[in-house]
Amino acid sequence: MLIRLVSSMEKVYPERELQAREYPAGQAFQGERLNFQVAYRWEGFPAWGQAQVESGLEGVSLRLVELEPGEYVCPENGDGNYQRRQAGLFPDILKPLEGAFRMYPWQWRTLWVSIDTCGEMPGEYPVTVQIRVGDRVVGEVCFRFRLLPARLPDQKLVFTQWMHMDCIAQWYDVEVFSEKWWELAERYVRFGAEHGINMLLTPLFTPPLDTLEGGERLTVQLVEVRLKRSALEGGSGPVWEFGYEKLDRWIAMCERCGIRYLEASHLFTQWGAAHAPKIMAQVDGRTEQVFGWETDSLGKEYESFLRAFLPDLAAYLRSRGLEGKVFFHVSDEPSREHLERYGRLSRLVQELTPGFPKMDALSDYDFYQEGLVEVPVCGTSYIGPFLEHDLPHLWAYYCCSQAVGVSNRFLAMPGARNRCIGLQLYHGKIEGFLHWGYNFWMKQFAAGAIDPYRVSDAGGGFPAGDAFSVYPGPEGPVASVGLELFQEALQDLRVLQFAESLCGRDTVEALYAKVDYKDFAVSARKPEEVLTLRQRVDALVCDCLGQQAGQ
């Protein structure tokens, strides 16, 4: 057997010769996770292997990197920083290692090793990984891990990655809001929080996202709405009542899982804010849909509803101490042609929810300049004008459109292109980051469910790797390589901010002044680019701490 230690950013393909640099040693601060891979190539007949790890550390775990098929892997306008352009198998699924695993001849495969620092003393720790076939050791490597003498401060960046709660219900074949659904939902939320998500998309009403006009997604509505039709018939106008029992439970779940912010689902449909989301209500004891695609967003009926609902909701949220921690959306990704309509709706929402931030994903600076969005969430390929104005609350996002130059997490991109966004977020002074696909296990426009172990591109709608970062396991989420690499980027950001708190921003900026990928328009190509900078920042932190201790 051939066996080597390689960085977590290396993507090891079974049909290619392994050309990755050795990664024999690494370091991390307390409270951080360090990942590396054990790459191996078995040269006998198919066999069952077993892996075990020996270390003086408590928090060491092994996972098997399994292959995910990808068909639409590189957009037509994709740049040269993709590892392949044709369909194939990609290392992405991080399956928990339980018992023996199958080894196939003449293929490079990897084991994923994670070290979670759990209060151990700073120092050097060898981490030995053995692969056995029966009683025979067929491969062994030893990784040298150094635990640095400081605890990494908590994450400052606000990070939301949209969880699609209807997809959980559909995959596991459970009813929305059943006890089993709540149990599964909490596992996915907790798992997300463990990987840096600290804001959660909250479905007040079924989120009007990635849905074909006239189409419908499974109802996931936390707010109970009641309409007294008798009041309508009496000529007194609609009388709306609202219940928050499910929202109470949702907020309690978020608090248990470590979610610090809530992101209220969009009050108008995507790509133009032309309609209302699907809203279900109890009307004289019967459940009916009262708003949806047939509703003009500027119509008096829906405005009347919002004037009743939003102040009531705001009062409820204030009673829970959530003012300033709940962000409201108008519509996702409006274009310049929608500016007038969006403006009227935005001003209405601002009027009815004072004290609560308003955020939306957009790419046109005019929306911010006219005061329509307090927290602009800008696509990384269009963020230049926003950065030039040094905005106080600038967020960033990427999705399927960010395919040229910029960082992203498509399966065909090198791992360094995913992780390098940590420096970019720091350099751009970005306050928050949004990604749309935590678990979108559907075809584009919600045109039907898919099996995420077979389809990685939303039925050909988005480049493979864009639509989801977790896979559905038997009882909860299974991580992906893309998810883990983005968490590493978040840790890089925390280390840069830590260094700034100790040494000042000018010192930190001087450290990476000549790094090509510090701006969003360029992304890293090789792991050593990211690892070298990270080692420099680690050294700066340790030097500053040593100087302080000596004073």
Image: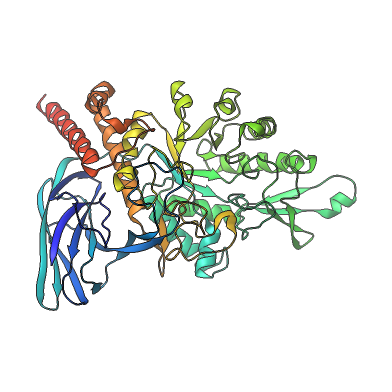
For the C terminus, the quadrant is: top left
Q: Position of residue 36 (x, y in %)?
A: 21, 53
Q: Residue at x 79, y 43 (%)?
A: 301
Q: Nearer the viewer, residue 500 or 247?
A: 500
Q: Residue at x 37, y 36 (%)?
A: 156
Q: Is residue 141 above or below residue 485?
A: below
Q: Quadrant of residue 341?
A: top right
Q: Residue at x 38, y 33 (%)?
A: 520
Q: Nearer the viewer, residue 546 or 494?
A: 494
Viewed as shown, does residue 3 lie left or right of 520?
left
Q: Position of residue 444 (x, y in %)?
A: 55, 55
Q: Quadrant of residue 513?
A: top left
Residue 392 appears anywhere in the view: no
Q: Position of residue 39 (x, y in %)?
A: 19, 60
Viewed as shown, does residue 40 lie left or right of 249?
left
Residue 538 appears anywhere in the view: yes
Q: Is residue 421 above or below residue 8?
A: above
Q: Nearer the viewer, residue 226 or 380?
A: 380
Say how the picture is coloured. Answer: rainbow
Q: Position of residue 274 (x, y in %)?
A: 70, 42
For the N terminus, the quadrant is: bottom left
Query: Total marks drawn?
Result: 0
Viewed as shown, does residue 132 lie left or right of 522?
left
